[in-house]
């Protein structure tokens, strides 16, 4: 086996290549190398027209007051790797942060399946099963972090297993470049400065992770808020006729508190829930008052049909909103027949003119 080792500032640097063994033994050698340096996996070659080829370069990076992490650079042919529960029992848990440089891969862990394109940074938890498919030759740099270190770096309460940071995001690009520069320059950085340089690179990565998680949370929040508002609006529309329709009833139908529902409505419409209900009731009454086919319908019936419990409150709200009382609006809009305007029924006289 051809192994090139050199004493670097950070410690031992190792380069392992399939070119150092007989062609017939290369895939077995590669499996051994991957298991030893990255994680215990079952590796299957996806090339069949030539001997398998791969190179791995490893280096351990010290961090002040934190566990060391490993930088691993991989160039290899197409392959499928699987980490099974049986293999997990034999190794210590860690996180793999994969920087895709050339080619692409598909990562699967838990319920997530993520495609990594050049520039993306993917996450795998070695304490759980996963699989990674590289359909063609690829280049990838990997940070292998102890779980303790990863917990300090990653956002709290978020499971990133199988997820990825999009390479097109500015903070991801900054983190990626800093980590790659650290990988390629670690052996020439003075040992006294290496932990600080590593901490800075890890800090940029942590920032990119937080920014991505926050952006995803905002998208989810917007979707959830939109769903809350859609359901609340639907409930209001279905129950406008109910005089007992209230903010509390609407909130219960959605499954949130009345206070939170009020906050969502104010943010989305600049109205309270009660104002929104009133506006809809008035809009429906106004529409029916202008409808000639409903000219024989009393003003009181129209008001009661849309959830008003008192004719006086309906008249005041209508005048406050539209500048005229309901009877005046009906006459001006042509919604009442002349005979109806001249001979108002007793129920109409229950609606005040002012």
Image (spheres, rainbow, N blue to C red):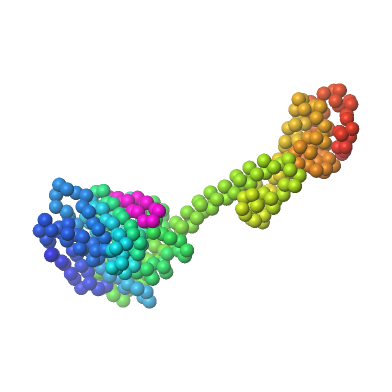
Relative side of 266 to 69, left or right: right
Residue 342 position by quadrant = top right
- Check the image and report above or below for 130 versus 188: above
Q: Residue at x 28, y 52 (%)?
A: 133
Return the residue nearer the eye: 336 or 24: 24
Residue 83 point in image, percent of width and height? 30, 59
> Splitting the image into 4 quarters, where does residue 151 fall?
bottom left
Q: Where are the magenta residues, as a range? A: 102-116
Question: In the drawing, does residue 59 fall left or right of residue 152?
Answer: left
User: At 24% from the left edge and 63% from the top edge, which residue is drawn?
Assistant: 35
- The residue under the point 65% across, 52% down is 252
Give residue 77's position: percent from left, percent from top: 21, 52
Q: Main secondary structure of the magenta part?
A: strand
Q: Position of residue 251 (x, y in %)?
A: 65, 52
Residue 345 place in picture, x, y as percent: 88, 30
Q: Is residue 341 visible?
A: yes
């Amino acid at each position: 086996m051809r192994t090139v080792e050199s004493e670097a500032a950070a410690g031992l640097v190792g380069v392992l290549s399939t070119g150092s063994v007989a062609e017939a033994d290369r895939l077995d050698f590669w499996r051994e190398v991957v298991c030893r340096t990255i994680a215990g996996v079952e590796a299957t070659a996806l090339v069949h027209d030539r001997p398998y080829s791969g190179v791995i370069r490893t280096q351990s990076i010290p961090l002040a007051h934190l566990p060391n992490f490993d930088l691993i650079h991989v160039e290899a042919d197409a392959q499928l790797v699987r980490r099974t529960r049986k293999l997990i029992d034999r190794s210590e848990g860690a996180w793999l942060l994969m920087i895709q440089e050339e080619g692409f891969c598909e990562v699967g862990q838990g319920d997530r399946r993520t495609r990594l394109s050049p520039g993306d940074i993917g996450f795998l938890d070695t304490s759980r099963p996963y699989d990674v498919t590289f359909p063609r030759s690829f280049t990838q740099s990997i940070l292998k972090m102890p779980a303790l270190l990863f917990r300090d770096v990653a956002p709290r309460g978020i499971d990133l297993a199988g997820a990825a940071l999009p390479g097109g995001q500015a903070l991801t690009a900054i983190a990626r470049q800093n980590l790659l520069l650290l990988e390629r320059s670690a052996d020439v950085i003075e040992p006294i400065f290496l932990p600080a340089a590593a901490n800075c690179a890890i800090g940029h990565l942590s920032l990119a992770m937080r920014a991505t998680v926050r952006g995803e949370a905002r998208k989810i929040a917007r979707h959830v808020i939109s769903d809350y508002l859609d359901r609340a609006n639907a409930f209001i529309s279905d129950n406008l006729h109910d005089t007992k329709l209230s903010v509390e009833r609407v909130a219960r139908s959605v499954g949130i508190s009345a206070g939170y529902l009020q906050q969502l409505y104010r943010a989305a419409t600049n109205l309270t829930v009660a104002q929104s209900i009133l506006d809809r009731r008035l809009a429906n009454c106004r529409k029916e008052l202008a409808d000639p086919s409903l000219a024989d319908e009393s003003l009181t019936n129209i008001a009661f049909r849309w959830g008003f419990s008192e004719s006086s409150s309906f008249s005041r709200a209508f005048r406050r909103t539209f500048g005229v009382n309901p009877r005046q609006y009906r006459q001006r809009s042509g919604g009442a027949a002349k005979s109806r305007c001249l001979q108002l029924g007793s129920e109409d006289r229950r609606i005040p003119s002012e």
